[in-house]
Amino acid sequence: MIIFLSKSDIFIYNYDNLSYLWLTHAKEGKMYEVEKLIDLSLLHVGHVFLNKNWDYDDIISPFSRLYYIASGSGKIFHHGQEFQLKPGHLYLVPSFTYSRYICDHSLEQYYVHFLDGVGEGLSMYHLRSFSYEEIGSEWEESLFKKLIALNPEQHLLRYHPKNYDNEEVLRQTKNQIKGLPLKVKLQNQGILLTLLANFMKDKQDSSRVEGGSSYPKLFRIFDYIQQNLSQKLTIPDLAAYSNLSPDHFSRRFRQHTGYSPSDYIQLKRIERAQLLLTTTDNSLSQISFMVGITNYSHFIRIFQKFTATTPAKYRKEFGYAKPDLRGG
């Protein structure tokens, strides 16, 4: 076992099950357990030179992505934000996040894909707040290089997400990782946590860890909703997925989010629509269908409810600018 000390946190590494116990200071100098047994599993790591073909939309993956940009430029869209990829910077795209990727000309990047878990089906993103962009250094670049040297067979052979972000390939990749030597697993875990530490915010959101035994079930439903916004989502189905009664589910959901399940789903659909309106050239009716609202008139009404404008006006104001793909 190894214990890492910092000003506000203690990390305890357990050799037996390759996991971390994260403790953080609270009021009156007491210690509270914030994240149980953070299990990080590396899937892919590599160094690549990209061009205009790195242009992917409608990406929602069960794993997280870490990037270090060595040269060039590009864009990533997620969580309602646009991130301009800049050399010397680090970027995090959490798991189960709708995202869009664009390279206008050329981009040199180091990448890592990894799974995380903290027990009970939860993700570390449910318990801790993270930033998505940070300034990096040669130190972080060297950590990516170290991961590549430790895992020479884990680079992507093809870069379109449909070729590696599917159940069969993920299962094969996880089986490969299980066969790694213990020494490599330990080093992978340590390096991944070191890279992730750049994005961890100093203060945790206490509301993320309070609320009793039903909260882990609710956390899982947020990922489920994000993955299935294009599908029909009903309260009975969501409650069943959470192993709660519909009334109990609705009550706890509102306590935790401030929204009814129906309003929350509508909000997330409109947030997804806003991203699609500004990052794709899909038609308004296509976007309505992509976010799970099959009646276009209903889509316009819900969009106005949350944004006080129409989809057409929103696109006109923040509109999609088609990237210049001529190169040069």
Image (cartoon, rainbow, N blue to C red):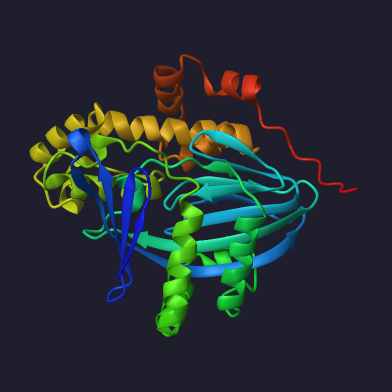
Residue 88 place in picture, x, y as percent: 69, 48
- Note whether 260 is above or below 189 in the view shown: above
Residue 21 place in picture, x, y as percent: 27, 59
Going by the image, does 287 lie left or right of 298? right
At x 60%, y 60%, the residue is 111
Q: Quadrant of residue 180?
A: bottom left
At x 22%, y 42%, the residue is 209
Looking at the picture, tell me which residue is in the foreground, 292 or 2. 2
Residue 240 place in picture, x, y as percent: 16, 51
Looking at the picture, tell me which residue is in the foreground, 271 or 124. 124
At x 37%, y 60%, the residue is 116
At x 42%, y 51%, the residue is 96
- Note whether 294 is above or below 242 in the view shown: above
Split into 4 quadrants, where in the image is the N terminus?
bottom left
Say if residue 6 shows up in the picture: yes
Looking at the picture, tell me which residue is in the foreground, 103 or 225. 103
Residue 285 place in picture, x, y as percent: 53, 34
Q: What is the residue that sits farthest to the top in this orientation?
A: 308
Say if residue 64 shows up in the picture: no
- Note whether 274 is above or below 184 in the view shown: above
Q: Quadrant of residue 256?
A: top left
